[in-house]
Amino acid sequence: MAIDIIAGVRALFGTSSADIRGKLDAINRTQAVIEFALDGTILAANQNFLDAMGYAEREIVGQHHRIFVDPDDAASPEYAAFWERLGSGQADVGLYRRLGAGGREVWIQASYNPVLNRWGKPVKVVKFATDVTGQRLRMADMEGRLSAIDKAQAVISFTLEGIILDANDNFLATMGYSRDEVIGQHHRMFVDPADRESLEYREFWEKLGRGEYDSSLYRRVDRRGREVWIQGSYNPILDMAGRPFKVVKYATDVTAQTRATRTLHASLAELADTVPAIAEQARITNALANEASRSATDGGALVEAVIATMAAIQEGAHDIAEIVGMIDSIAFQTNILALNAAIEAARSGVHGKGFAVVAQEVRMLSQRSADSARDIRALIERTLERVQEGNDRSGEAGAAMRDILTSVETLLDRVSDVARATNTQAGGIDTVRRAVSELA
């Protein structure tokens, strides 16, 4: 159904019917167009409008405009006033939120235009609209992202020359300023005085002025002159022609982390310096442990030799004891023989007197041999006791020395492990130190 709004357009443009028809066709091709009675009843709509709202023409003609409006808004005094203004001949232009078929949200950039008759009285309303839902959603998405960034990060904007345009609360809290204290000032107020006139600082702003962004860890100075470390990016913003017209900085205060990293770096550097000395001490300890192991091994061999010698002495003492036993037995038998000889000499009378003297001497010699044998036996028994005691002590010393040798070997293994671990640790600490140095 074509929309007959030629009269209204003629009133708007004041030209011929042919020219009006051409302009109307152009508008009809490019824009969504809908006509209403002064009370808001829908009279007609073009295909662009129907497509934008998702309706067929038969579904909306005769309905009221409120079918495109949220029920709460349609019942509001503002909505009634909106139609009163149109009915009085006042146009309304703006961005409108409307509802399409199924309650789908549609955003339109539109103008509601009262059409006047030749006497200047409004007779109906023509709406020209453009569907900007996609743009609006993209803008809402962008605004949502910017809002999230604004809540989470410190944000400040500058002219291309470095003059501060605005700063959010996060940035102001980080640097200790109020908004009035920074707006209109130059970025250099946050820079160490020693760096403000440097070539690097001038080149920094020249780079941003060319539209090149810069991202790094920056050292800045707050209102009290305290050091502040910021992880941030300076982002040139381009106009529609692709030319930079301002710079926005997004930043996060990493002062605590940076100080901790630098402290860790210094500690690691100090530790790395001490590791070679520790490694040298480990090497010396390892050498001493090796020497102790060799000494323990030699001592163990000596103790084993002493044990063998004591065993040989004990065996010799037993042999001597057996010989003394034989001597004692011979002395006893000799004494018996001497006693028998004395008896026979007595029987022989005068003839046996000389023999009796000899027998007495033999008997006395036998007695002395027996006494000496007993003394030797007692001495050997005492010697055997001492030898046995020494043998026991030597055995205990041998067992202790073997335990010591085992412990020394275990210690040597542990010291060797420590030496190897220290060398490995030295390499690992150096690697960590270099990594932390890059972070710092």
Image (tube, rainbow, N blue to C red):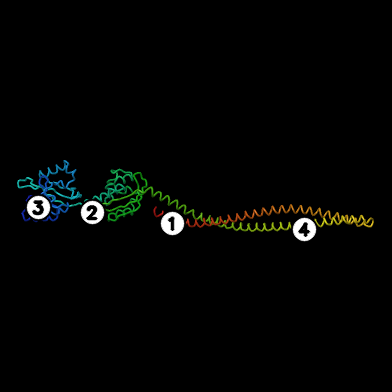
Name the N-terminal-most of marks 2 and 1. Answer: 2
Mark 4 sits on what residue? 323
- Provide residue 344's location: percent of width, then percent of height: 90, 56
Question: SS class of the residue under badge 4?
Answer: helix
Mark 2 sits on what residue? 239
Q: Nearer the viewer, mark 3 or mark 2?
A: 3
| Along the line of sight, the residue nearer the viewer: 71 or 250 | 71
- Label 4, label 3: how far apart the Cα atoms are: 152 Å
Q: Amino acid at mark 2?
A: Asp
* Disc ID at residue 431: 1
Question: SS class of the residue under badge 1?
Answer: helix
- Provide residue 49's location: percent of width, then percent of height: 15, 52
- Label 3, label 2: how far apart the Cα atoms are: 40 Å
Res. 391 image quadrant: bottom right
Q: Nearer the viewer, mark 4 or mark 3?
A: 4
Question: SS class of the residue under badge 3?
Answer: loop
Q: Nearer the viewer, mark 3 or mark 1?
A: 3
Q: Residues within 10 Å of mark 3 (few under 14, many from 20)?
A: some
- Label 2, label 1: how far apart the Cα atoms are: 47 Å
Mark 3 sits on what residue? 3
- Label 2, label 4: how far apart the Cα atoms are: 126 Å
Residue at position x 44%, y 56% from top?
A: 431
- Compared across the picture, whether 327 is left or right of 15 comes to right
- Label 3, label 1: how far apart the Cα atoms are: 79 Å
Q: Amino acid at mark 4?
A: Ile
- Compared across the picture, whether 439 is left or right of 41 comes to right
